[in-house]
Image: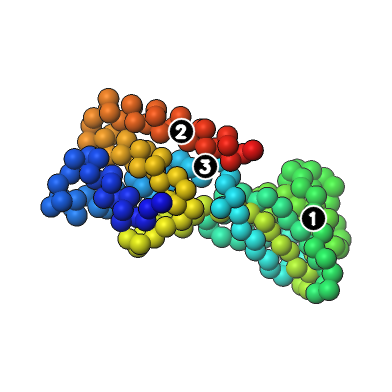
Amino acid sequence: MANLEELRGIVLDNLERSVADAKLQAANADRWINHVVRKIFCTRHNWDAMEATYSINTVASQDIYAFPSPDTKDIKQVALRTGSGAPYLPLREESEDQVDQDFPISGTTGIPVAWARSGAAIRLRPMPASSSYRVRARVWDYPAKLVDPSSTNYWTNQHDDIIETLATALGYRWLGDFERYNALWTLGMKELGDRVEDDAK
């Protein structure tokens, strides 16, 4: 369990940076740590800590809705309710070609029964007939970038040892020490694979 400042200090110590030099290299260490969390941990696996839920009202005759956050990695489920007292009912996920075939854009509006990914947006079909419907999206979001020295998140609290190993490896690559980089990277990725397998259970 560690915050950004503690991880930064460990990584710089591993790279044999002096205390005087550590401040100069803090931005690099922070970049490596954030890269490991956001790009290595979270592109390879959808962790429970990445799950988020958003909801918005539909717009009558509008079928495209942007992903709820710029940090949204993927959509887990889209559900719809037709009124404030109604339950959310999951919509059927289809390919964009399939919803175009099943519900041509020139067709009439109605209550959406299906959705498809459309770039960084979702497409509802049929197009909503009302602006009073509510759409709920359950998604996986990339974690916010660690900026404040006291910042923590699920991965710094539960997997700080792997972050330390992989961020240190990135530091050695930056220094041109590819032998140490390869050794640490292999070690860290092996451990990460084991953790992902355990988490998937």
Look at label 3 and name its amino acid.
Thr
Residue at coordinates 57% horizontally, 47% vertically from top-left? Answer: 47
Q: Earlier in the sequence, mark 1 or mark 2?
A: 1
Residue at coordinates 72% horizontally, 70% vertically from top-left? Answer: 57
Residue 43's mark? 3
Residue 12 visible, this angle:
yes
Look at label 2 and name its amino acid.
Glu
CA separation in Å, label 2 and label 3 = 16 Å
CA separation in Å, label 3 and label 1 = 25 Å
Residue at coordinates 48% horizontally, 36% vertically from top-left? Answer: 192
Query: Dot 2, how many residues are within 10 Å of its Cα: few (below 14), some (14-19), or many (20+)?
Result: some
Element type where label 2 sits in the image:
helix
Q: 34 or 201, which lies in front?
A: 201
Residue 4: x and y, percent?
35, 55
Residue 191's mark? 2
Residue 94: x and y, percent?
77, 45
Indicate which label's residue lies in the foreground, 2 or 3: 2
Where does the C terminus fall, quadrant-wise? top right
Residue at coordinates 32% horizontally, 60% vertically from top-left? Answer: 149
Q: Earlier in the sequence, mark 2 or mark 3?
A: 3
Indicate which label's residue lies in the foreground, 1 or 2: 2
Q: 36 or 9, which lies in front?
A: 9
Look at label 1 and name its amino acid.
Pro
Residue 60 visible, this angle:
no
Query: Dot 3, how many residues are within 10 Å of its Cα: few (below 14), some (14-19), or many (20+)?
Result: few
Residue 167: x and y, percent?
34, 41
Q: Earlier in the sequence, mark 3 or mark 1?
A: 3
| Residue that numbered label 1 is attached to | 90
Element type where label 1 sits in the image:
strand
